[in-house]
Image (cartoon, rainbow, N blue to C red):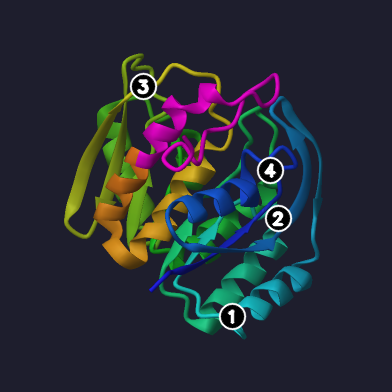
């Protein structure tokens, strides 16, 4: 059975991140893609120009429209913009008993522009993390969620993965892309049975716009069929392929997008 996967996130007119990346990723993973928009973002590969957050009640109505009509096998949450939207999402997903939820706690765009109001961090931490099957923060996002100092050592990152799971989610994928290792990136997958280190070679490219969105979306699309651990491994392999093939695209003059369909296009 083809899985139905819902993205709850913001937009990207140039197609590299947000719901645009999620829809491409769901499709590449063989799932049927759906989306509820949280914010309309004027951005491109060079940065965010402006952001208009939608009314939380309207975000809730979009989610209702999907769940009232369609079987939803998994949900991926990206940029939520503000506390009101985070609260609305949590309320509706709890109402419908969504049992496979992937939270990518998007706070800052690749360009450095903020996509989450500082006042919303508590709502993400207290309302969205506890309903999540897995959260996929990078190191700066983990530091914010834990109100902590920079995570610079392996021990600190292992402790942080454990602390993040203590916020109420079932699994944590703490991404290692912000470490100083020039040759490889090591993610930590922490769950009920402990912590696994997932190492991958670092691909030298500036075409990394939407990397976090794409990884989380692939995980969401694959969990219903594979379970969390195998979904994470398969999603990381897909991400590596999409990054490695990104120079086949000619999109923008900043951080270009990944090649989401490298396995499908010849």
Front label number (1 vs 4)? 1
* Residue with the mark numbered 3: 202
* Residue with the mark numbered 4: 115
Identify whether 170 is placed above or below 94: above
Disc 1: CA contacts within 10 A as few (<14), some (14-19) or many (>=20): some
Q: Earlier in the sequence, mark 2 or mark 1?
A: 1
Q: CA distance from mark 1 to mark 3?
A: 39 Å
Secondary structure beneath disc 3?
loop
Membership of 248 in magenta stretch: yes
Residue drawn at (72%, 68%), measured in percent from left and top?
59
Judged from this view, the residue extending furthest toward the left is 193
Residue 33 visible to an observer of this rendering: yes
| Image quarter hosting the N terminus | bottom left
Residue drawn at (70%, 52%), measured in percent from left and top?
81
Left or right: where 100 falls relative to 47: left
Q: CA distance from mark 2 to mark 4?
A: 9 Å
* Residue with the mark numbered 1: 67
**Between residues 236 and 153, which one lies in front from this camera angle?**
236
Secondary structure beneath disc 4?
loop
- Stretch of the chain drawn in magenta: 238-266
Front label number (4 vs 3)? 3
For residue 244, which quarter of the picture?
top left
Residue drawn at (20%, 43%), measured in percent from left and top?
196
Instruction: Considering the whole magenta stretch, tell me its main secondary structure.
Output: loop
Front label number (2 vs 4)? 4
């Amino acid at each position: 059975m083809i899985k139905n996967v819902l993205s709850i996130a913001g937009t990207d007119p140039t197609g590299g991140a947000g719901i645009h990346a999620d829809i491409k990723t769901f499709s590449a993973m063989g799932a049927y893609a759906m989306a509820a928009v949280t914010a309309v973002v004027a951005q491109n590969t060079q940065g965010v120009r402006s952001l208009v957050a939608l009314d939380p009640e309207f975000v809730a109505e979009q989610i209702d429209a999907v769940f009232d009509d369609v079987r939803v096998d998994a949900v991926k949450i990206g940029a939520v913009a503000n506390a009101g939207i985070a609260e609305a999402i949590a309320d509706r997903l709890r109402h419908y008993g969504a049992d496979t939820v992937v939270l990518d706690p998007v706070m800052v765009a690749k360009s450095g522009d903020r996509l989450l109001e500082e006042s919303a961090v508590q709502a993400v931490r207290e309302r969205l993390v506890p309903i999540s099957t897995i959260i996929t923060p990078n190191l700066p996002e983990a530091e914010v969620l834990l109100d902590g100092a920079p995570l610079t050592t392996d021990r600190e990152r292992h402790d942080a993965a454990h602390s993040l799971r203590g916020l109420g989610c079932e699994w944590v994928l703490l991404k290692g892309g912000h470490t100083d290792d020039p040759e490889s990136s090591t993610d930590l997958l922490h769950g009920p049975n402990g912590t696994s280190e997932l190492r991958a070679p670092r691909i030298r490219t500036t075409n990394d716009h939407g990397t976090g969105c794409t990884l989380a979306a692939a995980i969401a699309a694959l969990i219903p069929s594979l379970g969390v651990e195998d979904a994470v491994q398969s999603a990381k392999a897909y991400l590596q392929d999409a990054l490695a093939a990104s120079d086949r695209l000619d999109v923008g003059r900043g951080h270009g997008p990944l090649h989401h369909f490298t396995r499908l296009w010849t």
